[in-house]
């Protein structure tokens, strides 16, 4: 517990100012920031600037083709720099009728904060700012240099971040990076992820008549909904295999060390199934087979389908339009742009050249070595503060711009955050525990301190 003892004065400050830190988080949460709808984005970027300015940084907004990046940096005692990557945009709050409270009210009840974006990702922004405030209040100068890169497009696949990174490599430069998410596993143990999957997110569109018609004309008028269903079935069959040519060609199998790491993961299957409300995983997978599928295989998922009448009761129409959102999570060495091109060629060759495709999001997979110094720093400080060694996941099942900001520049990154397994990010009733938020503030201080001395 050496780190905890040496930082007791900082931790005491954090505990005594917990209410102020919580209020700052609530202020951020009460400001909507839905990138997909351009809802409150300018106001939130300005609010994030104000938060960073309040702890002595000189932040600025850097324009992109989309929403601006909020950037700030400050030197420290040692000539080392730790980057913090976050995003100020959040998912839409829909469906609103499934929330138990207003998603923008940031209510505190039952020991939790309930709001859209509290876990993903505003709780982590507020925890990092509060950690810096506490350190400076007690110790003065930061132990290391710190950089904040807080973008506004992560929830729409960060389309502008590659251009930002390539145009501003000096702003991305750091000795290591703390990534934007993390927290506790389903059994309460802290967890670390050392890589992210990539993503290829495509919208498919089919068209028919110039408007919806009476469904009796289905004898002679094509139905774009069926057309799209048949195309989706060609892309992926009932056996779960993705039929896009070359889709699996670049998939890298796990190493022996990675397989052993999977074998060491705790058994959460029963708890996961209960939380999901399903009787079993796909194909009845379990144990190592399930882990290999979750962490080392790509996915191809229909995330949404829209056509015709979907309201209550019956309305007998033949739709004129149909569209589907196709979400492909990619593993090491898969190229999202090559996969989209292959998908387009596949549809053309199979006679679906009338179906439009639009690439809405593309991110490369990225990884950090388990031997990276920042991984050890985060693991050691988790154990000091939480009293438990963290569960180390070779990769996350999710995606993000890790490659854009870190991997392409050779920067090691590691996750650390304030969420938990039932935070319900992207879903109704998103939440974090107040105690975990306060603990997350302390963790940021411990990481800075240990990284400065490592």
Image (cartoon, rainbow, N blue to C red):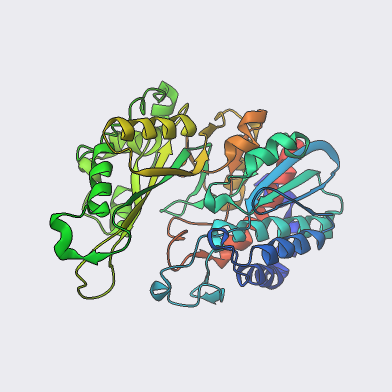
Can see residue 264? no
Image coordinates of residue 227 in percent, x first then y, are 25, 47
Find residue 322 and report its horizontal and vertical position in percent.
32, 55
Q: Position of residue 238 (x, y in %)?
A: 19, 40
Front in this rendered view, residue 114 or 355: 355
In the image, residue 42 above or below residue 394: below
What x and y, as percent, mark residue 5? 71, 51
201 vs 210, nearest the viewer = 210
Which residue is found at the position 73% from the left and 48% from the top? 148
Residue at image location 87% in from the left, 54% down from the top: 140
451 and 165: which is toward the camera: 165
Q: Quadrant of the image for the C terminus? A: top right
Q: Residue visible at 40% across and 22% down? A: 256
310 over 146 or under it: above or below: below
38 relative position to 425: left or right: right
What count of labels does the image hold? 0
**Quarter location, residue 40:** bottom right
């Amino acid at each position: 517990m050496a780190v905890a003892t040496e930082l007791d004065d900082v931790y005491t400050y954090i505990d005594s100012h917990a209410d102020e830190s919580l209020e700052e988080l609530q202020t951020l949460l009460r400001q909507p920031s839905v990138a997909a709808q351009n809802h409150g984005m300018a106001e939130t970027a300005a609010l994030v600037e104000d938060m960073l300015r309040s702890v002595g940084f000189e932040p600025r907004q850097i324009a992109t083709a989309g929403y601006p990046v909020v950037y700030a940096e400050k030197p420290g005692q040692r000539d080392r720099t730790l980057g913090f990557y976050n995003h100020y945009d959040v998912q839409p709050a829909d469906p609103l009728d499934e929330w138990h409270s207003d998603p923008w009210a940031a209510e505190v009840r039952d020991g939790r904060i309930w709001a859209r974006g509290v876990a993903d990702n505003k709780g982590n922004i507020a925890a990092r700012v509060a950690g810096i405030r506490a350190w400076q209040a007690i110790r003065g100068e930061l132990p290391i240099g710190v950089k904040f890169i807080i973008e506004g497009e992560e929830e729409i696949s960060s389309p502008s971040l590659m251009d930002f990174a390539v145009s501003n490599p000096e702003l991305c430069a750091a000795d290591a990076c703390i990534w934007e998410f993390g927290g506790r596993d389903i059994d309460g143990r802290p967890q670390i992820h050392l890589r992210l999957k990539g993503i290829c997110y495509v919208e498919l569109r089919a068209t028919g008549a110039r408007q919806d018609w009476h469904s009796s004309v289905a004898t002679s008028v094509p139905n774009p909904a069926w057309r799209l269903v048949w195309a989706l079935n060609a892309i992926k069959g009932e056996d779960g295999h993705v039929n896009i040519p070359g889709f699996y060609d670049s998939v890298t199998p796990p190493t022996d060390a990675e397989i052993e790491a999977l074998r060491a993961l705790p058994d959460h299957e029963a708890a996961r199934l209960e939380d999901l409300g399903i009787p079993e995983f796909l194909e009845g997978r379990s144990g190592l087979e399930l882990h290999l599928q979750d962490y080392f295989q790509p996915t191809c998922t229909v995330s949404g389908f829209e056509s015709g009448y979907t309201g209550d009761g019956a309305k007998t129409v033949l739709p004129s339009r149909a569209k589907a959102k196709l979400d492909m999570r990619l593993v090491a060495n898969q190229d999202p742009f090559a996969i989209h091109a292959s998908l387009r060629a596949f549809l053309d060759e199979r006679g679906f050249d009338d179906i439009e495709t639009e690439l809405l999001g593309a991110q490369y997979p990225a990884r950090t070595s388990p031997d990276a110094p920042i991984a050890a720093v985060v693991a050691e400080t988790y154990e000091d503060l939480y009293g438990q060694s963290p569960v180390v996941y070779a990769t996350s099942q999710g995606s993000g711009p890790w490659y854009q900001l870190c991997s392409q520049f050779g920067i090691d990154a590691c996750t650390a955050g304030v969420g938990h397994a039932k935070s319900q990010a992207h879903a109704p009733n998103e939440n974090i525990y107040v105690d975990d938020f306060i603990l997350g503030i302390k963790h940021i201080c411990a990481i800075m301190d240990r990284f400065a001395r490592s």
